[in-house]
Amino acid sequence: MSEFSLWDIVYNLLLAGRWTVLLSLTAFVLGGIVGLLLLMVRTAGNPWVVRFVRGYVELFQGTPLLMQLFIVFFGLPLIGLDVSPWVAATFGLTLFTSAFLTEIWRGCVESVGKGQWEASASLGMNFTQQMRYIVLPQALRIAIPPTVGFSVQVVKGTAVASIIGFVELTKAGTMITNATYAPFTVYGCVAVMYFLICYPLSLFARHLEGKFRNVAR
Amino acid sequence: MSLVELHAIHKSFGALEVLKGIDLSIDEGQVIALIGKSGSGKSTLLRTINGLEAIDDGVIMVDGKKISERDTDLLALRLQVGMVFQQFNLFPHYTALENVMLSPQVVKKQSKAEAREIAEEMLAKVGLADKMMHYPDQLSGGQQQRVAIARALAMKPKVLLCDEVTSALDPELVNEVLAVVRQLAEEGMTLVMVTHEMRFAREVCDKLVFMHQGRIHETGDPEEVFSNPKTPELSSFVGGLA
Ligand SMILES: Nc1ncnc2c1ncn2[C@@H]1O[C@H](COP(=O)(O)OP(=O)(O)O)[C@@H](O)[C@H]1O
Ligand SMILES: [Mg+2]
């Protein structure tokens, strides 16, 4: 099977790697938006909404990502929605990401003291203004390092999408292995590529952590 | 009619009844000192006046208008009633100037120039014209509290509530804050202050309200009340301070 040079392997993996990056970015951005909405409605404090969001978070934290993707991929057709692996993977990873991010951010919002809420309320601000000008800016500083750190989990999570047939890095690795019978080389290359995506993110998160620890405001 | 009227205010936290029927009227320009032991309900009473604490029963009227629990009413109420807290509660991510400018801009929709002009005026009034660009963590406690007063004043409230505004300060910083409060009183600002500074209360306030176990136990002219307390509770409270 020597028609495949190492370069062919790497080249094909790089092509598929673009989908890993795209899926990660999409899930992260959409998950971030959904997570922020959940955070806002949860912080506003209607007890039923709080309970719903808590249940949502528990559900996604308490089940394997693989099961979540299976349920989306095989469940949506049952209610008449036939979705491609790309849509199913995006949808599933978005839900997964939103649950984790909203929980990370909840902790950050809660670290902003009651005095800040009361002072801004006594100045006549409504909930949206309090969030926008007082609470979120302070929470954001604390939230950035763990958020960037979590993005690594999202990148690695995209590997699971290979199981429902979405051709990203891991799936491409499997397909190339089937053609080359060189699993060690191929998966070795796959691992290196994940590492090249994730390691800079980890470094960046650590850098931010140090930076924000030293800044009081 | 008084500027603020409280009728039969009741408030409980769970089974704990903290306000047991409070009647109080505050006239325009009046300076009221609220005194009493810790836990007697002073802060809770103050916080009901600007809706930070919802009441269980009773009526609050500000400027002739009855306040209900509706959000819009509360926001309107807070435009009339400013508050300064024991712990300052400045916004740490904004400079002194930004702390003072923010609400006029976002709540009252004033232009940036307008808000800045008022903020500079208020900061100058509390003696901090040279600290406008400082962040709260670059200011002393006394300076932070003065920024907090300027921030409340910039909203042009009709009444200013002060909850132990000097209690968190080192002793040497107390006077600079009291001087600002005294100046406000002299300018005719309506003030309700919870305080342990009895000498200050005696010199500056028009009316003294002594709270005991969730009720207004005794009230009157400060000189009168201090020199001749009518109830044993106030007598022992004043005695305990001396
Ligand atoms: N949010 C709250 N929840 C439960 N109890 C409270 C709360 N706020 C105040 N209390 C209780 O109400 C009582 C009166 O408190 P407060 O008004 O702060 O008194 P003061 O300011 O006179 O010291 C105290 O027993 C206090 O523990
Ligand atoms: Mg108190």
Image (cartoon, coloured by chain):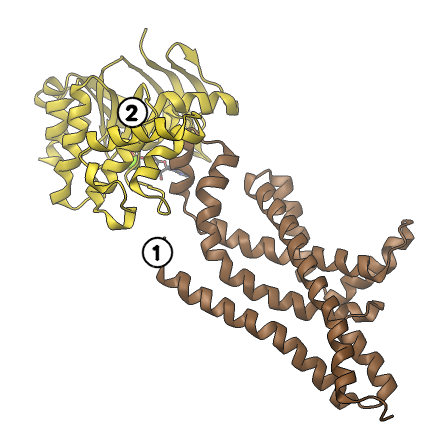
Chain colours: A brown, B yellow
Q: Nearer the viewer, mark 2 or mark 1?
A: 1
Q: Secondary structure at mark 2?
A: strand
Residue found at x 49% / y 35%: A129
Left or right position of B106 against A32:
left
Residue position for label 1: A216
Look at the image and tell me in which quarter the N terminus of chain B lies.
top left
Instruction: Place residue A114 in its image quadrant.
Output: top left
| Neighbour tally class for label 2: few under 14, some 14-19, many 20 plus, Cα within 10 Å | many
Evaluate whether residue B116 shows in this view: yes
Q: Is mark 2 within 8 Å of ligand 2?
A: no
Left or right position of A95 against A140:
right
Type of amino acid under label 2: Leu
Residue position for label 2: B160
Q: Position of residue A66 (x, y in %)?
A: 76, 67
Q: Position of residue B126 (x, y in %)?
A: 20, 32
Residue found at x 55% / y 57%: A104
Look at the image and tell me in which quarter the C terminus of chain B lies.
top left
Residue B123 marker: none
Type of amino acid under label 1: Ala
Q: Are marks 2 and 1 in contact (CB under 8 Å)?
A: no
User: CA gap, disc 2 to disc 1?
Assistant: 30 Å
| Neighbour tally class for label 1: few under 14, some 14-19, many 20 plus, Cα within 10 Å | few
User: Looking at the image, in which quadrant does ligand 2 appear?
Assistant: top left
Where is B153 relative to B3, above or below? below
